[in-house]
Image (cartoon, rainbow, N blue to C red):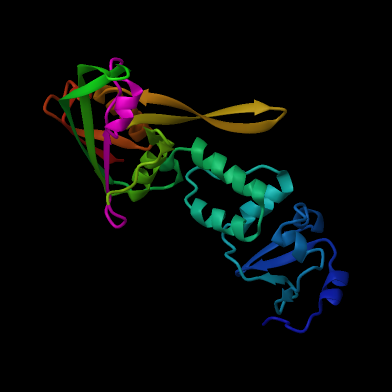
Amino acid sequence: MLDLNSSDDSMKNSLKDPVCLNVGGEVYTTTLDTLTRCRDSMLGTMFTGQVPMLRDSCGNIFIDRDGKVFRYILNYLRSGSLDLPDGFTELALLRREADFFQIPRLLEEIRHYEVSVPLGLRGGPLGAIMIVKVDSKVRVLHFNLRHGPENYELRTCSVRAFTVDLFCTWRAFLGLLCERFSYRTPQGLNSPHLCRPRQNRLKLEWVPKPDELPQEQYDKQQYRGLTLSSPEVTWSDDMMNMHYSHCEITDMQGFLEELLKISLAEGFKVDLVSPDPADILNCTSLRLVKS
C-alpha cells in the first residue's frame, strides 16, 4: 500500500541516509548524495523536496518505474561511469529510463557504449540470416563540357553503378548498417533507409565519381557516392571524445570487405558464397548466419 497523504515538507524533513527505494517492486538502498548527484535530473528534484513522493507500506520511497535497470542508474550516479555486464541486452530500456530521469551525461555514456560495443554483444537472435545480392553495371554518359560562351565540347565518360540488396531477419542489424553507411550528396551525408518500414530489406545504390567527370555533371545526373563511417574514440583530460572518420566506397570489393568486417564483428559467419566460394570479394550473392 502507498501512503498518499505525505506532504512535501514532511517528506523532505524525514529524508536521511540511508534512503530505501522501491522502484517497480525492486528495493534499493542508497544515499541522498547519490540521488542528488545530478541536481537538474528528475531524481535531483525529487530528493531535494521539489516534487511530491510516495511511500510503500514498508516506508520505502516508491518510484513507479522499471526497477530492473535502475541499479545501473544508481551505479552511474555513484561512480560517474557506466558499468554494464557482458551481454547486456536491456540497453533500449536503460536509455528510456535515463531519458525519463533526465540524466544527460548518462544518455551520452549510453550513446558511446552503443558505438563502442558490437551490436551482437548487446543481444540478438541466434540463427539470424542475412542474404546479400550485389550487381554492377557500366553506363556510358555523354555530356557537354562548357569552355566559354557558346563554346561546348562533347565528352563521353563511363560510370559504374553499384546495387546491393540485403535481407536480414535481424532488423536491428540493418539499422546498424544504415548508421555505418551513408550517401554522399550535394546536401551532405544522408543515411539510407529500409525499403519499407515493415520490411527487413535494405537496398543500396551508388555511383562513384570518375576523375574525368566534372562534379557539376555528376550532380546533374543525381548520382551519389557511398561512404563508410567509422567511430573513433579519443581521450582528453579523462574525457571521452567520439568522432567519425569517413571512407569512400569506390568499388564492390571494398563494400563487401567492409560489410564482412561489420557482420563478423556482430557474430555472423559466412554460410554460402556464390559463384566461387574461394573468391568472396567477387561474389554475386552471399549468405551469413549469426551464431
Residue visible at 75% across and 66% down in the picture: 46
Read off the magenta span: 196-222
Is the residue 114 above or below the residue 211 in the image?
below
Q: Position of residue 39 (x, y in %)?
A: 78, 55
Q: Quadrant of residue 2?
A: bottom right
Residue visible at 50% across and 48% down in the picture: 88
Q: Where is residue 194 in the image (x, y as percent from the top left)?
A: 31, 48
The foreground one among 17 and 230 is: 230
Instruction: Name the image quarter holding the N terminus.
Output: bottom right
Residue visible at 34% across and 46% down in the picture: 193
Is the residue 127 above or below the residue 161 in the image?
below
Q: Position of residue 61 (x, y in %)?
A: 73, 70
Give the residue at the far front of this rendering: 150
Q: Quadrant of residue 36?
A: bottom right
Instruction: Name the image quarter holding the C terminus.
Output: top left
- In the rendered structure, does residue 81 fall within the stretch colored magenta? no
Q: Where is residue 70 in the image (x, y as percent from the top left)?
A: 62, 58
Residue visible at 57% across and 64% down in the picture: 66
Q: In this view, does 31 lie to the left or right of 192?
A: right
Is the residue 71 above or below the residue 120 in the image?
below
